[in-house]
Amino acid sequence: MRAIDIGTRRVIQAAASATVAEAAGIMRRQQAGCLVVTREQDDRVESVGIVTDRDLVTRCIAAHFDPATTPLECVMSAPLLCCRPDAPIDEIVDTMQQRGVRRLPLIDTAGTLVGIVSTDDVLAALAELADRVNQTLNAQPMLDRAYL
């Protein structure tokens, strides 16, 4: 299982200069728990950080910053921790565990954001795999009879 196969290709993004209030509105409308923060550099959009709903609360609201004037670059997690779209599931889990993150944007070799994978995506993929193994085990007695 590869990151791109278990993650989602729909990634919500906002500019580093956008305010926390604008980001919160985007996240509410898109029903997203995070967004990737971007910055335009050399005529291309580059992913530079990530902001979660928890970040908005702990780094802005609880710190008594004004959401209407605080730019995302002040509350985002940076540099952006990401993984390759073809990263295997064990590499994804290792990175998440070692770095203490629940989401990893997927950046291809050209530097393009192509998706995002979360711990929920990993758990769903592993549950599906476990279910397939269980189905195989339940079918095994019938398969064994074929050898008699």
Image: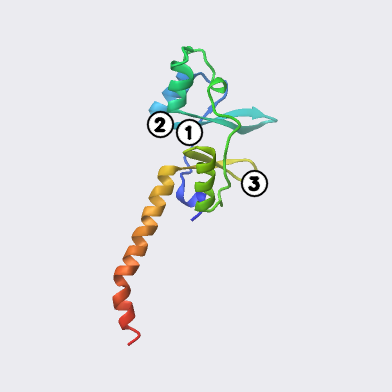
Q: Residue furthest bottom?
A: 148
Quarter of image, res 107? top right
> Can I make out residue 148 in this image?
yes
Cα distance between the residues tagged 1 and 2: 8 Å
Q: Residue at x 29, y 76 (%)?
A: 141
Q: Secondary structure at mark 3?
A: loop
The residue at which mark 3 appears reads as 109
Q: Which label is found at residue 44?
A: none
Q: Secondary structure at mark 1?
A: loop
Q: Residue at x 54, y 50 (%)?
A: 91
Q: Are marks 1 and 2 in contact (CB under 8 Å)?
A: yes
> Can I make out residue 115 in this image?
no
Cα distance between the residues tagged 2 and 3: 27 Å
Q: Position of residue 110 (x, y in %)?
A: 65, 44
For residue 49, side relative to residue 26 (left or right)? right
Q: Residues within 10 Å of mark 3 (few under 14, many from 20)?
A: few
Q: Position of residue 111 (x, y in %)?
A: 63, 41
The residue at which mark 1 appears reads as 12
Is residue 1 depicted above or below 139 in this figure? above
Q: Residue at x 33, y 78 (%)?
A: 143
Q: Amino acid at mark 3?
A: Thr
Q: Amino acid at mark 2?
A: Gln
Q: Residue at x 47, y 40 (%)?
A: 10
Cα distance between the residues tagged 3 and 1: 20 Å
Q: Amino acid at mark 1?
A: Ile
Q: Nearer the viewer, residue 32 or 44?
A: 32
Q: Which label is found at residue 30?
A: 2
